Image (tube, rainbow, N blue to C red):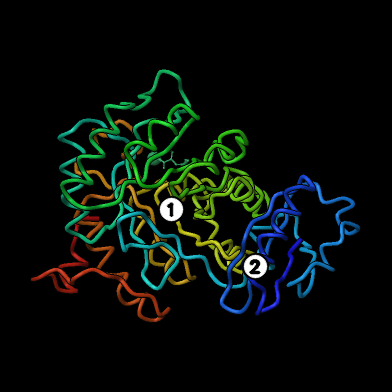
Amino acid sequence: MLVVMQSHATPDEIRAICEKIETLGFRAHSVEGAQRYAVAVTGDLRGIETCGLEEMPGVQEIIRISKPYKLVSRESKAEDTVVRFANSDVTIGGEEFALIAGPCSVESRAQTLTIAEKVAAAGAKFFRGGAYKPRTSPYAFQGMGVEGLKILAEVREKFGMLIVTEAVDTEALEAIEDYADMIQIGARNMQNFSLLKRAGRSPLPVLLKRGLSATLEELLMSAEYIMSEGNRNVVLCERGVRTFADHSRNTLDLSVIPAAQKLSHLPIISDPSHGTGKRDRVTPLALASAAVGADGLIIEVHHDPDHALSDGPQSLFPEQFAAMVDQLRGILSVVHRTLNVEPPKGRTQANTQAARS
Ligand code: PEP
Ligand code: MN
């Protein structure tokens, strides 16, 4: 439910509405749009109609939100959300296309710094790398933990990129808050509701990946879990779903991007690395993601993928990543997005295409 305030409502009137909502046992969330100021009410709303909110001073109207997700919905906020980061002017969801790149896992200091230098030079503003890895086998590499987070913090220090890394549980999330800039919730944890709630109480923005077989509504409901705890900085991520198709690891569902943008004001980015699982498919699907209106990309890059401890077959070589960024320029100009990356000196279209495939 949305309590829309009159344009001349005073701060005291708004405060009184919020207090009333909280006293009734619901939660009040301010929703500031360009056209209107509203207070969204969440909780089990049965019986709230009779509570007299409509008659309170400063209230213009009460709107019921028809969707099961409320704060995530365009019905509560018409304008696109632009996710911002502390001490940085880089955003996700604004005019600038977001580029997140790095290895699947932080494997060592040398490996991570080598890749970081290359993706930073190619224009990535965000560095990805898992210090905690959700692996299908308990015997596979599980990540370096806090040691890995320290290496990621060094990457931020040295190259100025913002750090995105996955929290597999609340303990990892708390450690990540001390070192990183954005918390990734992985596909396998998309419906780990206690983890989502804890992420909702974090000051850091959250990158929420779609579950392996989650519908769009389930993805949006998971985002609602995060937002309902107060964190408004949520970015959705399409990373492929399981289908009968066996030519790729997953099926990257690009149609979900415009569908999500219609229903929600949250930014949505694409992960063609996990979405395809195969190196030679990553760049084509990255370009297609930009063409359908994604707000950014998250791409796995490794300088020695044959020896990567996870996801080597889908990792681009650094020069392939640089070539992909170059190719994005053309697509992004058509969809009116900017790429805040200097064109590399000496690289031409011809040698871009000749980059290793
Ligand atoms: C990852 O980003 O390395 C990862 C494990 O992704 P997902 O949760 O989408 O499988
Ligand atoms: Mn991976």
Residue 258 location, quadrant: bottom right
- Category of crowding for the residue at label 1, using alpha-carbon neighbours closer than 10 angstroms: few (below 14), some (14–19), many (at least 20): many
Q: Quadrant of residue 172?
A: top left
Q: Is mark 1 within 8 Å of ligand 1?
A: yes
Is the C terminus in the top left, top right, bottom left or bottom right quadrant? bottom left
Please tell me whether mark 2 sits on a helix, a strand or a loop: loop
The percent position of residue 283, horizontal first and vertical second, equals 34, 60
The answer to whether residue 98 is left or right of residue 349 is: right
Identify residue type, mark 2. Arg
Q: Which residue is mark 1?
A: 271
Q: What is the CA distance from the residue labelled 1 to the residue labelled 2?
A: 24 Å
Pointer 2: what residue? 74
Work out which residue is located at the far front of the displayed protein and give it.
Answer: 12
What residue is drawn where x is 38% and y is 23%? Answer: 140
Q: Amino acid at mark 1?
A: Asp
- Among all residues in the image, which is located at the extreme top? 139
Q: Secondary structure at mark 1?
A: loop
